[in-house]
Amino acid sequence: MQQKDNINNLIECWKKATENGLIHDEGRMAEFWNKRSENYANNLGKDNRKKRTDEILKFLEEASFSPEGSRVLDLGCGPGTLSLPLSRLGAEVTALDISSGMLNRLKDTVKK
């Protein structure tokens, strides 16, 4: 039952997100997020990203989610703000993003 509720919730979210037509044009979306990736470091300071990541990880812990041994799909992963910490905590993470710029940032971070 929970899985069906989750799927219905995702469908409703998709409908709401596509009402304005922006998502229907993947090229425009990719261009938008690539431009955003260029300014990402300036838009949200490292301390703010860490704080937000810590808040999300705390929420997941409170919800009894254990990353160790879990498989996680991070849609819209950006520069790996959640993908990397979850991976370090033992999750097998697949990170996807429409922005090649964001994925490049993630790859650079992984290399470091």
Image: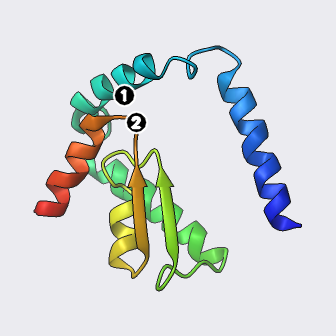
Number of other residues with Cα within 10 Å of mark 1, as a class: few under 14, some 14 to 19, many 20 or more: many
Q: Residues within 10 Å of mark 2 (few under 14, many from 20)?
A: some
- Coloring scheme of the render? rainbow
Residue extending farthest to the left is 112
User: Element at badge 2?
Assistant: loop
* 27 vs 108: above or below: above
- Residue 98 is tagged as 2
Q: Residue at x 32, y 39 (%)?
A: 44
Residue 12 placed where, x, y %?
A: 78, 37
Instruction: Pick whichever of labels 1 and 2 is earlier in the sequence.
Output: 1
Using the image, determine if residue 95 lies above or below residue 66: above
Nearer to us of marks 1 and 2 is 2
Residue at disc 1, secondary structure: helix
Mark identifier at residue 33: 1
- Amino acid tagged 1: Trp
- Locate residue 86: give its quadrant: bottom left
Q: Residue furthest bottom?
A: 69
Q: Position of residue 100 (x, y in %)?
A: 28, 36
Residue sitting farthest toward the right: 1
